[in-house]
Image (cartoon, grey):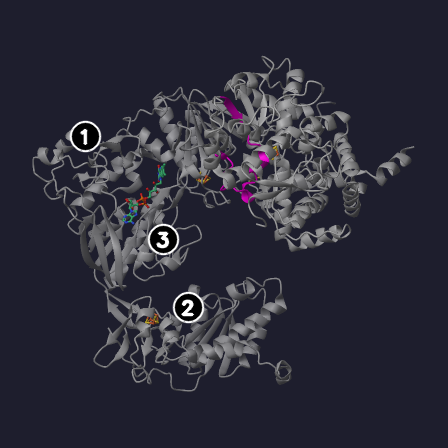
């Protein structure tokens, strides 16, 4: 039975192209599948991620397949493909928009959720979360805390207000939603 | 020639207008969008309209017949056809009017296709309103048109052909063999153009020089052809049938009449520089002949490199060296002109990821032609630039600078590179059966006669590997090898190959100086988006320009292979000879006229005219317009402070009624409000 | 441009202040020598990171980025920043909001809740750009003349970092992103040689959230780069971005660890942020440039030992 693996495409939709077209990615519809993007991709050289195929899947609207695939997160956003595409497809930007859609559908990598928590709680994606970092700063003749949200609690509050305002907290399950999630589970 | 205002009263312009409006369905193009019968009803309500008819295709015999009959029956004395663009069919309908017995300038075309149904396809009521506007304006204009008389001018039976590539050569020979005088001008010291640089030609694989050089010498021998190499056109005056051309002949510094081409001078010249013909890959002396079979076969000194040591002067047996040669200017008069200045290969340095100019063993395809050529820099033995080693693994990169929409290259497909890459790869394999060859392509375009067969044959019998995927980048390895990165899109796998040498299949671009050419020959307005010169009509007038009497042939209009180039050259020659055989041409009488009683003699108009059509009559103290030189642009009309210039056909009398009827009058109430 | 070109608002981001503070230390010291004042941006946050947060929600990324920009707008100063990621974010956010009225309106609706407004009055500059275009190679070269006594003589493997040059459209390098040379030019003023090595312009692997979620994948990029740098005999890696810096510094230790079986020998190439190198070249001490590791602190950078460099340049500086 393992030999039988139907991969035939039976449903094609314009959803994705439409979504991306609205965001200004008309060029994507003119992709000629030349492969420059895959050929340029440092990620594709070591993984199964295929930029060109991804662009084709977008054209065909294979939404579930794209958004649920963790390969969508293999791109290191080096922009090489975007610079070289002969049709001016903003490939990397398309990938970023697809990631937005994936997050909306609830597909997120665990470590990324952790990052969002730190961002919400401290205003920094990489915060000072251990004593040694303060010491290191002092060793280099700097104040133990930088003049960022770390030094200004009111600035930290501003960030939280904004993340609530854009519903980033709800989207990524941080802040109030972190607790709620926990409650639901329990 | 200065025409006085003619008495045209008898030319059926006196009677009050009786306008016939004919509305064309253009199949479904117009009829499928707007309600044509309703438009007819509407047209009948317009002033002076006596009848309105419709037909599926007004341009057909039947359609034209309708117009002719109504004229002959005396029903109408002015005609409006609402159909396509006048660029398409104005001539057709004018001829119908003429054949019906009406002065053909009493016709007006309303463009309700390009300007209406094609662009407003999805809005039927809107389109109908727009169509009404167009028809109303055309009716307003036609009521005010005056009959005009066409002028005819004599056509000199001689042609200037600019550019002596394979296009220019063929056009020149056809015309010369039909008995016309031909001046053939090329800015390089030899004729032949790019074709002379090629090794073999697809799809027949015949040797390029074997088929070019006989033509080149035929040019030199033909008594009707005056060949001017190392020359350029500096200015153009006059008009169809009577062009005055100024040509500069650059000094060769060698007397071209006495030089026998013996070549003694070359051996002794101490200065070595790169030969343009071999794209810098072979050295030449400061005194040189581009290549052995060059036509003409006389030598030239490159003064940018010559150090004036005097040695060549000493050794020349015929004493032909003239260090103090000066440029020479020649004035000629011709009836027609053919532009055949060809193309430039795309400058691959702009595609940075391919490292052309940076990575030594990355060359362009024209360089490859020279390397393959038996009279090329290496005598036909292909060697890679970094260490002169014979390459064993080669890659051709397709679409370099073509099909590129980002500004780094050109949007169009260059049409020849798929085939020339296949050809070059095959040539190489013929000589080196053990070599491994890859052609990386997006689409393999083999559209011409015998091309797909050529590709099939090459793939089958020569074992060349065609890989579908545009090359992403080229990297230089330590040993001079080139690393090629791409995706094999059919296998969906990235691919990295280390090869000895890479050939970039560069596209064909407009000449670097195309803007100068366009300006000198007054075809500026006829440049297309891609940068090449534009044909008067892409389908129906492929070798004409919008400037009458000037034709185009070959790659100056767009990239093409040799068969298409030659076909176009022959078409251009035929078009030019049609004009010359008739001996005279009609000039559209849209010229402007100075009303001498109003002209204050201020001369303002003279400097305004972009076509130098206005002169000043010192005796009568008035400006005069040459009706043949005048293109009817109207600049002087607007510029004359005494309002002494009127223009035929597009004057205030015709345009103002159109504007008035186009803009609905404001209700008076509103006007009050505004105040 | 908002400000006089000898004064900038210094945007720190996250990695520099919270992990690699010596980058700030060295940069401040060098800029001071060239009489460029760097003013603190009080209460700034994460830029927010283009790879991760932009990937999660573009709107949030725009809003928080805009908030950071408003801090500099209040100061009336252009932003100088030291990180390619922050560059990517703030440059794009600033441009988008200056151009797109609708997006700007939306963003300002959010910002209104914290009493801020994006006005679009300043520019975003990378310190490499400021060094290259404002201070200029000439001025730096002049300073090196009465700087060090012994030449530095190092072979440098410059790592540009993707977002310094790409997308090329908004950046100040004449659309050159395939084979740029400005960074090499800048660091060669130090008297060192900038090497050509295979895949010089390739990504370090850290960006796009890859390091966060798929560390091994991200380190495989780094491994390849380190191999190519080693093949070219690099003495030191030069970066212009703290995240690339981290990927080569900490990442090098990690690569040596997880790819033990894949690599022929452990890598040991010290990593310098470019201002550290310039500082040395104009006569500042390794200490001032933050090259000397604290003897007490454990688990802090530099993770890849500096010793080979310090030995090579000698102490006579
Ligand atoms: C690498 C390569 C291989 C090719 N192989 C083939 C092949 O195998 N088969 C095939 O069918 N086609 C091939 N082609 C295409 C072929 O080269 C062209 O179709 C053909 O040469 C075009 O001829 P032309 O006369 O239009 O232009 P050109 O050959 O460019 O000739 C133009 C002439 O005009 C002159 N000129 C330019 N500007 C001026 C000026 N201002 N004043 C006066 N003179 C001027 C030039 O000196 C030149 O002599 C190849 C093209 C390339 C690049
Ligand atoms: S490079 Fe551009 S055109 Fe080519 S396959 Fe990728 S997205 Fe499509
Ligand atoms: S931007 Fe992403 S998809 Fe494009 S080449 Fe870089 S890693 Fe690959
Ligand atoms: S002919 Fe072939 S190589 Fe040339 S532009 Fe067209 S598709 Fe590309
Ligand atoms: S209408 Fe134009 S071309 Fe004719 S004379 Fe006046 S300015 Fe010259």
Residues under numbered marks 3 and 1 in contact, where contact means CB atoms less than 8 Å apart: no
Q: Nearer the viewer, residue C113 or A27?
A: C113
Q: Residue at x 36, y 28 (%)?
A: B427
Q: Which mark is residue B284?
A: none
Earlier residue among tags 3 and 1: 1
Marks 3 and 1, how far apart at CA: 38 Å
Marks 1 and 2, how far apart at CA: 65 Å
Q: Secondary structure at mark 2?
A: helix
Give x and y (percent) for residue A51: 61, 34
Tell me if I can see residue B577 in this picture: no
Comparing marks 3 and 1, which lies closer to the viewer? 1
Earlier residue among tags 3 and 2: 2
Q: Nearer the viewer, residue B510 or C17?
A: C17
Q: Quadrant of ligand 3?
A: top right
Magenta region: which residues?
C154-182
Give x and y (percent) for residue B440: 48, 31
Residue under label 1: B270
């Amino acid at each position: 039975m393992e030999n039988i693996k139907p991969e035939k495409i039976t449903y094609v939709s314009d959803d994705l192209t439409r979504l991306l077209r609205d965001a200004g990615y008309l060029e994507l519809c003119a992709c000629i599948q030349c492969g420059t993007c895959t050929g340029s991709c440092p990620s594709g050289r070591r993984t199964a991620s295929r930029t060109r195929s991804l662009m084709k899947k977008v054209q065909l609207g294979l939404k579930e397949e794209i958004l649920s695939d963790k390969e969508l997160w293999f791109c290191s956003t080096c922009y090489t493909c975007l610079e070289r595409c002969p049709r001016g497809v903003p490939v990397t930007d398309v990938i970023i928009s697809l990631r937005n859609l994936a997050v909306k559908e609830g597909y997120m990598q665990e470590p990324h959720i952790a990052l969002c928590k730190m961002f919400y709680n401290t205003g920094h994606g990489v915060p000072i979360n251990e004593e040694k970092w303060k010491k290191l700063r002092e060793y280099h003749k700097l104040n133990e805390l930088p003049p960022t949200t770390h030094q200004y609690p009111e600035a930290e509050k501003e960030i939280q207000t904004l993340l609530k305002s854009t519903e980033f907290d709800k989207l990524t399950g941080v802040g109030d939603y972190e607790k709620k999630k926990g409650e639901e589970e329990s | 020639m200065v025409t006085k205002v003619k008495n045209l009263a008898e030319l059926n312009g006196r009677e009050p207008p009786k306008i016939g409006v004919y509305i064309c369905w253009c199949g479904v193009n117009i009829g499928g969008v707007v309600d044509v019968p309703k438009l007819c009803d509407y047209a009948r309500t317009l002033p002076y309209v006596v009848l309105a008819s419709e037909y599926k295709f007004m341009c057909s015999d039947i359609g034209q017949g309708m117009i002719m009959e109504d004229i002959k029956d005396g029903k109408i004395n002015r005609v409006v056809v609402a159909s396509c663009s006048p660029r398409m069919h104005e001539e057709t309908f004018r001829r119908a009017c003429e054949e019906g017995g009406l002065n053909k300038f009493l016709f007006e075309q309303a463009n309700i296709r390009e300007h209406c149904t094609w662009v407003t396809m999805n809005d039927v009521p809107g389109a109908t309103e727009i169509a009404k506007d167009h028809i109303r304006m055309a009716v307003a204009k036609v009521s005010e048109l005056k009959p005009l008389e066409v002028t005819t001018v004599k056509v000199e039976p001689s042609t200037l052909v600019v550019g002596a590539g394979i296009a220019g050569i063929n056009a020149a020979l056809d015309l010369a063999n039909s008995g016309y005088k031909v001046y053939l001008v090329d800015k390089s010291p030899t004729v032949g153009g790019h074709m002379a640089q090629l090794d073999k030609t697809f799809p027949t694989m015949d040797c390029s020089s074997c088929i070019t050089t006989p033509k080149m010498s035929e040019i030199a021998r033909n008594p009707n052809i005056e060949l001017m190499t190392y020359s350029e056109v500096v200015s153009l005056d006059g008009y169809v049938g009577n062009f005055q051309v100024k040509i500069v002949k650059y000094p060769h510094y060698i007397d071209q009449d006495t030089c026998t081409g013996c070549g003694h001078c070359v051996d002794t010249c101490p200065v070595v520089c790169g030969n343009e013909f071999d794209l810098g890959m072979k050295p030449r002396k400061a005194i040189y002949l581009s290549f052995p079979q060059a036509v003409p076969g006389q030598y030239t000194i490159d003064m940018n490199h010559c150090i004036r040591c005097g040695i060549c002067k000493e050794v020349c047996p015929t004493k032909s060296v003239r260090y103090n040669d000066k440029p020479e200017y020649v004035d000629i008069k011709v009836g027609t002109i053919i532009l055949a200045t060809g193309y430039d290969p795309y400058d691959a340095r702009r595609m940075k990821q391919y490292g052309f100019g940076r990575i030594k063993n990355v060359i362009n395809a024209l360089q490859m032609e020279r390397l393959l050529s038996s009279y090329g820099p290496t005598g036909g033995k292909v060697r890679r630039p970094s260490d002169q080693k014979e390459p064993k693994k080669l890659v051709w990169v397709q679409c370099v600078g073509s099909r590129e929409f980002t500004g780094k290259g050109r949007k169009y497909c260059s049409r020849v590179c798929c085939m020339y890459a296949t050809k070059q790869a095959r040539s190489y394999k013929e000589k080196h059966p053990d070599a491994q060859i890859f052609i990386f392509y997006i689409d393999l375009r083999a559209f011409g006669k015998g091309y797909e067969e050529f590709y099939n044959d090459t793939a089958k019998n020569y074992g060349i590997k065609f890989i579908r995927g545009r090359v992403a980048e080229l990297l230089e390895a330590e040993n001079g090898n080139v690393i090629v990165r791409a995706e094999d899109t059919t296998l969906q796998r990235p691919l990295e190959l280390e090869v000895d040498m890479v050939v970039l299949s560069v596209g064909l671009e407009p000449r670097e100086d195309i803007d100068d050419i366009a300006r000198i020959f007054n075809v500026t307005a006829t440049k297309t988006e891609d940068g090449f010169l534009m044909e008067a009509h892409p389908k129906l007038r492929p070798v004409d320009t919008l400037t009458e009497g000037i034709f185009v042939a070959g790659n100056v209009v767009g990239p093409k292979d040799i068969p298409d180039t030659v076909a176009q050259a022959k078409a251009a020659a035929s078009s030019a000879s049609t004009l010359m055989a008739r001996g005279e041409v009609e000039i559209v009488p849209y010229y402007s006229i100075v009303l001498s009683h109003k002209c204050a003699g201020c001369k303002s108009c003279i400097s305004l005219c972009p076509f130098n059509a206005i002169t000043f009559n010192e005796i009568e103290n008035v400006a005069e317009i040459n009706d043949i030189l005048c293109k009817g642009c109207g600049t002087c009309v607007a510029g004359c402070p005494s309002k002494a210039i009127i223009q035929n056909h597009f004057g205030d009398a015709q345009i103002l009624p159109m504007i008035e009827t186009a803009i609905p009058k404001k209700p008076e109430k509103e006007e009050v409000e505004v105040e | 441009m908002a400000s006089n070109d000898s004064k900038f608002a210094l945007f720190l981001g996250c990695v520099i202040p919270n992990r690699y503070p010596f980058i700030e230390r060295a940069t401040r010291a060098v800029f001071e020598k060239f009489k460029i004042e760097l003013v603190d941006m009080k209460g700034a946050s994460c830029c927010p990171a283009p790879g991760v947060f932009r990937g999660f929600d573009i709107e949030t990324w725009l809003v928080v980025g805009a908030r950071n920009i408003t801090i500099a707008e209040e100061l009336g100063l252009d932003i100088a920043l030291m990180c390619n990621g922050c560059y990517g974010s703030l440059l794009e956010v600033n441009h988008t909001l200056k151009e797109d009225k609708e997006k700007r309106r939306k963003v300002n609706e959010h910002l209104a809740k914290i009493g801020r407004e994006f006005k679009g009055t300043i520019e975003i500059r990378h310190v490499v750009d400021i060094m290259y275009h404002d201070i200029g190679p000439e001025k730096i070269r002049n300073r090196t003349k009465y700087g060090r006594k012994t030449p530095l003589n190092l072979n440098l493997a410059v790592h540009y970092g993707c977002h310094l040059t790409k997308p090329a459209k908004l950046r100040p390098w004449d659309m050159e992103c395939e084979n740029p040379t400005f960074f090499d030019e800048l660091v060669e003023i130090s008297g060192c040689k900038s090497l050509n090595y295979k895949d010089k312009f390739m990504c370090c692997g850290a960006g796009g959230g890859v390091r966060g979620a798929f560390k091994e994948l991200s380190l495989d990029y780094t491994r390849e780069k380190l191999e190519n740098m080693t093949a070219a005999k690099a003495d030191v890696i030069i970066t212009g971005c703290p995240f690339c810096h981290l990927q080569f510094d900490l990442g090098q230790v990690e690569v040596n660890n997880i790819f033990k079986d894949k690599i022929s020998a452990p890598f040991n190439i010290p990593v310098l942020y470019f201002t550290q190198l310039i500082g040395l070249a104009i006569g500042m001490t390794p200490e001032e440039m933050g090259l000397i590791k604290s003897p007490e602190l454990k688990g802090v950078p530099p993770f890849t030992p500096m010793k080979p460099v310090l030995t090579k340049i000698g102490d006579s500086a």
